[in-house]
Amino acid sequence: MTDVSETDLNFIRRAIDLAVAAVEEGNRPFASVLVAADGAVLAEDCDRTNLSGDPMSHSEVNVIRTGIQKHGIDRLAGATIYVSGEPCSMCAGTILRNGIARVLYGAPGEVTGPYLAGKRLGQRYPSAGIFALAGDKLKVTSGVLLEDARRPLELYVAKGSP
């Protein structure tokens, strides 16, 4: 993992902690933190699809929506999104469309997949193909604090969540 600072690690830890809290509340095991280029936290949230009934209420979409509503879309230029697990293709497209410069996530899809097997999560479409469309305008780093990123997934399975 090159170009991962202690600040990056702290924000990934925060996303993982939020994902654990999400599972404890009955939501899915994913969370995100959106940080502006100047280091200001624009938004943080978890995946709320289980409790909201809204299939679009993924953590990445939630933080981007909140960030834009509270701070304006211009604040997303050069921003970084920290995610506990690999964004799905819908979230990858949302990240790409809104000018975010960096994505760092914990557990990649090949790690999350076995934990979520048999769950009502739909078909898995990796984010790499979507992110590749950005070329060098988007820096993606996966596997950040991977062992820690397993924690919300393990809790999700242990709780027998849908």
Image (cartoon, helix red, strand yellow):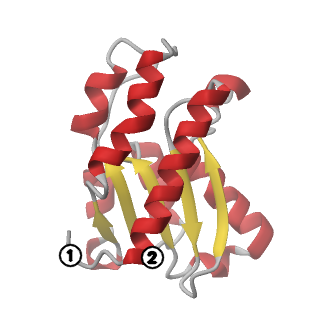
Mark 1 nearby-residue class (10 Å; few <14, some 14–19, many ≥20): few
Q: Position of residue 132 (x, y in %)?
A: 26, 62
Identify which residue, 26 or 131, lies in the foreground: 26
Q: Secondary structure at mark 1?
A: loop
**Residue 23 marker:** none
Q: Position of residue 37 (x, y in %)?
A: 53, 84
The residue closer to the viewer here, 115 or 53, is: 115
* Mark closer to the observer (2, 1): 2
Q: Examine the rendered structure and indicate whether residue 131 appears above or below residue 138.
A: above
* Secondary structure of residue under mark 2: helix
- Above or below: residue 64 compared with residue 122: below
In terms of sequence position, does the residue under pointer 2 or pointer 1 come before the other?
A: 1
Q: Which corner quadrant holds the N terminus?
A: bottom left
Badge 2 amino acid: Thr
- Residue 130 position within the rendered picture, expressed as x and y whole percent measured from the top left: 32, 54
Q: Which mark is residue 2?
A: 1
Q: Image point 60% across, 36% down: which residue?
A: 22
Neighbours of disc 2 within 10 Å: few (<14), some (14-19), many (20+): few
Q: Quadrant of residue 6?
A: bottom left
Inspect the image, locate mark 1, and give the three-letter code of the amino acid beneath it: Thr
Callout 2 touching callout 1 (CB < 8 Å): no
Residue 7 - label: 2
The percent position of residue 28, horizontal first and vertical second, equals 54, 30
Is residue 56 toward the left or the right of residue 3 in the image?
Answer: right
